[in-house]
Amino acid sequence: RFAMRPSLRFSSLAVIATAIIIVPGSAQKTTGPKAQYAMDVSTMSGMGMGAMMGGGLGSLLGGGGDNYILDLKLTSATPAPTQPEKGDHFFLPAAKMGKSVPLLGDAPGKSEPVERDYNPGQSMEKPKGRLLMFWGCNAKAPKGQPFIIDFAKLPTAKIPANMPAQMRGYEAAAKARDSNAAWWPNGKNGKQPKSGSSLRGEHRIASVFTPEIKFAVAGDYMASLNVNPSEQAGAILLGWNAVPTATGYAAYAMGGMERAGQGGDLVMWTSSNTREFAGGMDWMPPAEVQRQIAAKNVMPPSQTSCHIPAEAKAAAGGMMFGGMNAFGPEENYSFPPKPTDPKAVWNIDWTAKVRFRAFSSFMTGMGGAMGGPGGAPGPERKPKPCKGPLGIPIPGTQC
């Protein structure tokens, strides 16, 4: 379901709430915060985003203007009351969100269960085929690429005997965390804002289990990121518009998904300069973006093109599905203000973080029939429509 709680951002605050800590780079002693608020602001565009936002199959190939997504989460340092309805986020009219949206949590004993389909020592089915990994903005793959993982050569996979204990510990931590949190979108309300809305100005969060939170957002939804893939000398050239408030870019692409598990090659590519870099497709604070730009794992905001190597395109059979992230600014708020006396203890009631990003999905090589493993011609078969985001068949395509 789309109206699910956002990804988990904060661990339990119970320990730090009562401790006195030192803020890095400062001699100021602090306590709290009693509550933390997270506001994730995304501008989504590209192939499939219209369908994901409820536009149906007709909007699968994009269009329809910007798609905005908000994820809101309120976390308390102490357990919340037992009722699942815990708070509200109040907006200005320009947000086009109505007067407010409800922040909900789980009713007592109603937390989502952890999957238990495991059996200690049970052998899992060994995956088939290979994983071919490429990285970097290169028209031709450098020496050492691709890095190949041959699943057939891996040891027989077994579920660790201590997995149940690990899962029980995770489940206990999840229940403790969720008892201290409320979020939106949720089962009661999850209608996302439309193009033309604005988040600038005052925001107020009132709840039954945290102090009142009030702050004024200075930024707004980022401009759309539009990625245009094209073929160039056997490689795939990704070109995109410069997003004015972007701090950096990161991209990925995958191919051969229809062959995965059938003995064929699954191809993965990332714009990162190093194979080990696993970040880039979620959120990243501006300071970390700068650090990764220096390491050439994130592309600078001045860059507007990047190649997917010809070898990756060929191994994928020509068609690849991918996405690009434009990291954006971040705003941080807290109350009460920090004391001017560095020897005074700063007793923090709440903190709030507003993060911005733009994301675009894309597909290359649409319309051509895919070959067999490794891009070689496969046996004759009735072509099927290629699958895009969420496994929805793409009309007019063949795989």
Image (cartoon, helix red, strand yellow):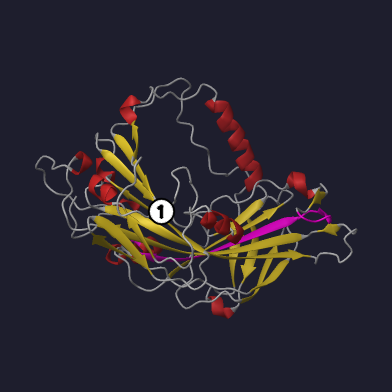
- Is disc 1 placed on a helix, strand or loop? loop
Nearer to me, 183 or 252: 252
| Amino acid type, mark 1 | Ser
Q: Position of residue 375 (x, y in %)?
A: 20, 44
Residue 7 appears in the picture as rendered: yes
Residue 277 lies in the magenta stretch: no
Q: Position of residue 159 (x, y in %)?
A: 46, 25
Instruction: Locate residue 383 relative to residue 121 in the image: left or right.
Output: left
Answer above or below: position of 380 versus 240.
above
Q: Position of residue 52 (x, y in %)?
A: 38, 60
Query: Residue 128: which quarter of the image?
Result: top left
Instruction: Locate residue 366 relative to residue 305 in the image: left or right.
Output: left
Answer above or below: position of 57 versus 281.
below
Give the residue displayed 58% in from the left and 73% down from the top.
Answer: 219
Give the residue displayed 23% in from the left and 48% down from the top.
Answer: 314
Q: Which residues are magenta?
A: 25-48
Q: Magenta residues: mostly which secondary structure?
A: strand
Query: Residue 72: which quarter of the image?
Result: bottom right
Nearer to me, 45 or 317: 317
Residue that mark 1 sits on:
271
Give the residue displayed 48% in from the left and 46% down from the top.
Answer: 278
